[in-house]
Image (cartoon, rainbow, N blue to C red):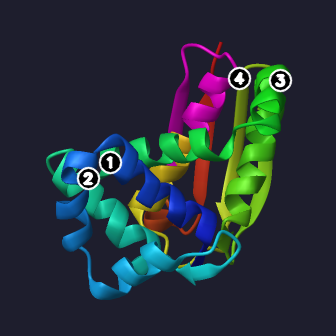
Amino acid sequence: MQIKGAAIQSTHDYMYTMHREMYDSWFKSLPAESQYILMNARSSGWYPVIEAAIIPTRQIGMLIFRGDIHKGAFQAGKYSAMSTLHGLYKLYVRFSSPSHVIERGARILASFYRPSSFQMLECSREMIFFEINDCDQVDEVIEYRMAGWIHKALEMSGCSRIEVQLTESFVQRGKIQFRCNWQ
């Protein structure tokens, strides 16, 4: 499985911007291949998901969040949404319905990982239920990065009482399913 360079850049930027005091320790803890990818990734390029995203995101959880890789991945995902949903996208997110934003956002998320495919399962005014399939080598940190991205996109839409549930894990069931509720 591969990940798009823009997602890789947001991981690097998250550490440099939000945890600058730990940036050097984090970067030095990564294997040489991960370091090389992080420093040279092009937004439109494709990179191996393990070296480019899973290992660096796991290290965020280990170093910044005292071993809580889920929290580290979730926070990195939230930052990724902030960094990708700016300018005209920010206006789009603010003035579109939350269900439309998440439906489009889920399609965008699926386009950052290849191979993968998106399927809408259910959608209403305050809920969306979808799955992402066909993605081998997905690790739980990728699923939690996606959950963080979705959560932040809903926040930017003006939603409150946001709940993003990972109802099916690729690691366990061969597909990723998210149920998102908000007010």
Magenta residues?
A: 150-167
Decide if residue 42 is on the left or right side of residue 56: right
x and y percentages locating residue 183 in the rendered image: 65, 12
x and y percentages locating residue 163 in the rendered image: 53, 26
Which residue is located at x 20 percent, y 72 percent?
A: 28
Residue 97 — which label? 3
Check whether the beta carbons of the residues at disc 2 and disc 1 lie within 8 A of each other: yes
Which residue is located at x 32 percent, y 48 percent?
A: 72
Residue 61 — which label? 2
Would you name the residue on which mark 4 appears? 157
Kind of residue indicated by mark 2: Gly
Residue 31 — which label? none
Q: Tell me which numbered mark, 1 or 3, is placed earlier along the sequence.
A: 1
- Give the Cα separation between the discs numbered 1 and 4: 23 Å
Residue 3, compared with residue 169, is above or below; it is below
Residue 72 — which label? 1
Residue 94, compared with residue 76, is above or below; it is above
- Give the Cα separation between the discs numbered 2 and 3: 32 Å
Q: Tell me which numbered mark, 4 or 2, is placed earlier along the sequence.
A: 2
Which residue is located at x 67 percent, y 67 percent?
A: 133
Check whether the beta carbons of the residues at disc 1 and disc 3 lie within 8 A of each other: no
For label 4, the SS is loop
x and y percentages locating residue 116 in the rendered image: 69, 71
Check whether the beta carbons of the residues at disc 3 and disc 4 lie within 8 A of each other: yes
Q: Tell me which numbered mark, 2 or 3, is placed earlier along the sequence.
A: 2
For label 3, the SS is loop
Tell me the quarter of the image containing the N terminus: bottom right
